[in-house]
Amino acid sequence: MQLWDRGCWRAGRTPDGPATTALVDTGDGHLEATAWGPGAAWSIEHLPDLLGEHDDTVDAFAPPPGLVRDLLRRSSVRIGRSLAVAEAVFPTVLEQRVTGAGARRSYRWLARRLGEPAPGRGGALGLRLPPAPEVLAATPSWVFHRAGVERARADTVRSAMRRADRLEEVAAMTAAAAHRRLTAFAGIGPWTASEVALAALGDPDAVSVGDFHLKHVVAFALAGEPRGTDERMLELLEPYRGHRARAVMLLEHAGITPPRYGPRIETPSIAHL
């Protein structure tokens, strides 16, 4: 995806094939969309999903008095859904056990080498499609190694992409059934399943238990505690059950961060080993 001051360009895969979608903010409260490629019609049809128009639980979000309610008065949070489960699993697995910056570097490296140019004008802008599931499934581990991805994460990606059809079935499941299906895949645990459920399914209650930073953000924002645990995070988020992801998004969008102790963690490169 490429962002600019009035919109964005997005490349992705749909059930009908690849598509490039351009979104432009017209300045009067509307968006204009144009799409190219075999999946163009699907992309336009499901654009309301991506933008959160079908977030039918947003009006039921009534947090108790406190910080979250105050933040909600300033900014509503609609949660979109891409409906592209396998496409969400790949970068999420890359984020396991490493920093976000390191995962994004690996993703860009792999997308540029394994993904095709995006259809239409997207290709001219340098956009690449995410690598196709069948391509990732057949990619040897040494290619992932060059991208800074060790064998464990590479094996998880390849194993999941071999059964991408089973992943895509998750889009039609309930939240509980989707979680069970995702965590049945080797190497996909609760954190990965929650991240995928939020991005691909728009689950407003997905909580990323096991996240390195999130527990500290929630503990600091809601209780003034500089450090937290997953158990403490879930305790503090309990009043927002059903909308815990929405509450977390409000905290993150507000830029609330706990105090830092020590230097930032750097992910060492394994590509040269």
Image: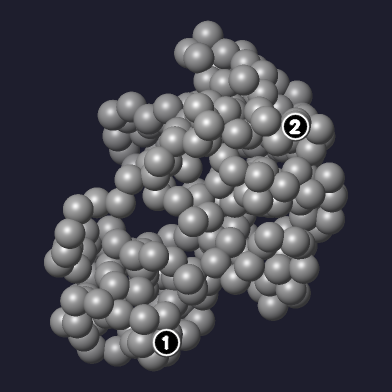
State the image quarter where residue 188 is shown: bottom right
Circles 1 and 2: CB atoms closer than 8 Å: no
Kind of residue at badge 2: Pro
State the image quarter where residue 151 is shown: top right
Q: Nearer the viewer, mark 1 or mark 2?
A: 2
In the foreground, 261 or 182: 261
Q: Residue drawn 39% across and 90% down?
A: 235
Q: Is residue 171 above or below residue 267?
A: below
Identify residue for label 1.
231
Identify residue for label 2.
140
How packed is label 2: few (under 14 Cα within 10 Å), some, or many (20 or more)? some
Query: Alpha carbon of mark 1 to alpha carbon of mark 2: how far?
Result: 38 Å
Q: Residue drawn 50% across and 50% down?
A: 95
How packed is label 1: few (under 14 Cα within 10 Å), some, or many (20 or more)? few
User: In the displayed structure, does residue 175 sit left or right of residue 146?
Assistant: right
What secondary structure is found at the residue carrying circle 1? helix
Q: Residue drawn 72% across and 47% down?
A: 155
Looking at the image, which residue sits at the far top?
124
Q: Residue drawn 42% across and 27% down?
A: 2
Residue 75 in the image, given as x and y percentages of width and height: 27, 62
Residue 62 in the image, given as x and y percentages of width and height: 36, 83
In the foreground, 20 or 221: 221
In the foreground, 93 or 143: 143
Q: Is residue 89 above or below residue 146?
A: below
What secondary structure is found at the residue carrying circle 2? loop
Kind of residue at badge 1: Glu
